[in-house]
Amino acid sequence: MQKRVTGPEIERLIQLLARVPGLGPRSARRAALHLIKKKDQLMGPLALAMNEAHDKVQICSTCGNADTVDPCTVCTDPARDQSVIIVVEDVADLWALERAAAMNAGYHVLGGTLSPLDGVGPDDLSIAGLVDRVARGGVREILIAVNATVEGQTTAHYITEQLSGFDLKVTRLAHGVPVGGELDYLDEGTLAAAIRARTAF
Amino acid sequence: MQKRVTGPEIERLIQLLARVPGLGPRSARRAALHLIKKKDQLMGPLALAMNEAHDKVQICSTCGNADTVDPCTVCTDPARDQSVIIVVEDVADLWALERAAAMNAGYHVLGGTLSPLDGVGPDDLSIAGLVDRVARGGVREILIAVNATVEGQTTAHYITEQLSGFDLKVTRLAHGVPVGGELDYLDEGTLAAAIRARTAF
């Protein structure tokens, strides 16, 4: 039987850190020891930042982004063209697409994908909210940027149907070879898609 | 240029999480989003645990372990045989050896290894503290459990010299094949050590 080697407060810190994605039980211990060593430079500020985020974070009632204001930073940004809405599964996808900085548009976070097996139906996603936004007018393009999975594509088709009555362009992300990718390692579906969508040099 | 997509409090949380070992900038964002989703189940308790640990953690003045009491849980454990002291480089090593639960002894954390190139001399480690503990009497064995690196072994030799005047046994960890290890992947030094230290079946 393993014996206690440190105080219950530190044990509890390790247990909680182990539940953070990216950290397991072993790296949680390593992280806890690092935090202890950097008590005032890192652990204190991090505790404060978590407390602040905990108190202030809210989900934008318009687009579903995680922010400390509602409507969120993206929805209220005057420099964005809100007539184009990029539909994503998750807040992480919104942030990832923004890092690409390829489009200066609005967003709509679905909160997942349709998945009958897991009991996720249209009412569990913010699809009605998206249709509402479109119905209010001023939207000319919906870019459905869901994952290229079966669930993602099913969800994309469902959304397209829901939006079929409106006069707007519904687009999706291109399939193709990832930048920096090696053909040899790509699956046939991706290669076939890249060939079909080939462009002039 | 990348635009802000969320509030400064959340950005700050991500920046601080990225400085935790085991998390990089990308996994820090993922961790932050998970914490936001599990606001009350994980982020709140974790902030609290960090605050508590920050306020209470201290380094044991006897052995150097990180704990919330001084002397620490290990030093005050009446079930431990404190006449044997296991000398380790770091608190992480103390915790790792305890997980093995192979020895019910006291510990002494050096706080690093001798490394003239990095300007780490004997006075930067708690070697004098170890000699003091031995001089106070009651110690019959010192197990030097430092890493099997050049710096570790140099430190081990230095400690052995410092303890040469006392009547006690100074031991070190055995070299050999790691449990579950495959011979084919092991270096020659380890294999040679395992052969020299072979034991009867």
Image: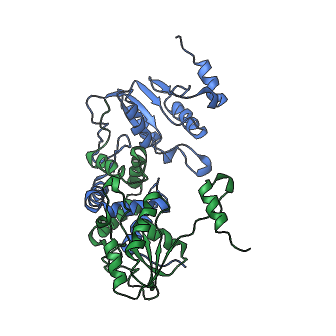
Chain colours: A blue, B green
Q: Position of residue A186 (x, y in %)?
A: 62, 30
Q: Quadrant of residue B5?
A: top left
Using residue A129 as the reference point, say whether residue B3 is left or right of it.
left
Residue B178 in view: no
- Check the image and report above or below for A125 versus A21: above
Using residue A36 as the reference point, say whether residue B78 is left or right of it.
right
Q: Quadrant of residue A63?
A: top left
How many numbered marks have been drawn onto this rendered protein structure? 0
- Depth check: A137 or B112 in front? B112
Q: Position of residue A178 (x, y in %)?
A: 53, 28
Q: At 46% across and 45% down in the image, what residue appears?
A: A111
Q: At 64% across and 60% down in the image, what residue appears?
A: B192
Q: At 39% across and 68% down in the image, what residue appears?
A: B158
- The N terminus of chain B is located in which quarter? top left
- Check the image and report above or below for A61 versus A1: above
- Depth check: A184 or B76 in front? B76
- Check the image and report above or below for A55 versus B174: above
Residue A92 in view: yes
Q: Position of residue A13 (x, y in %)?
A: 39, 67
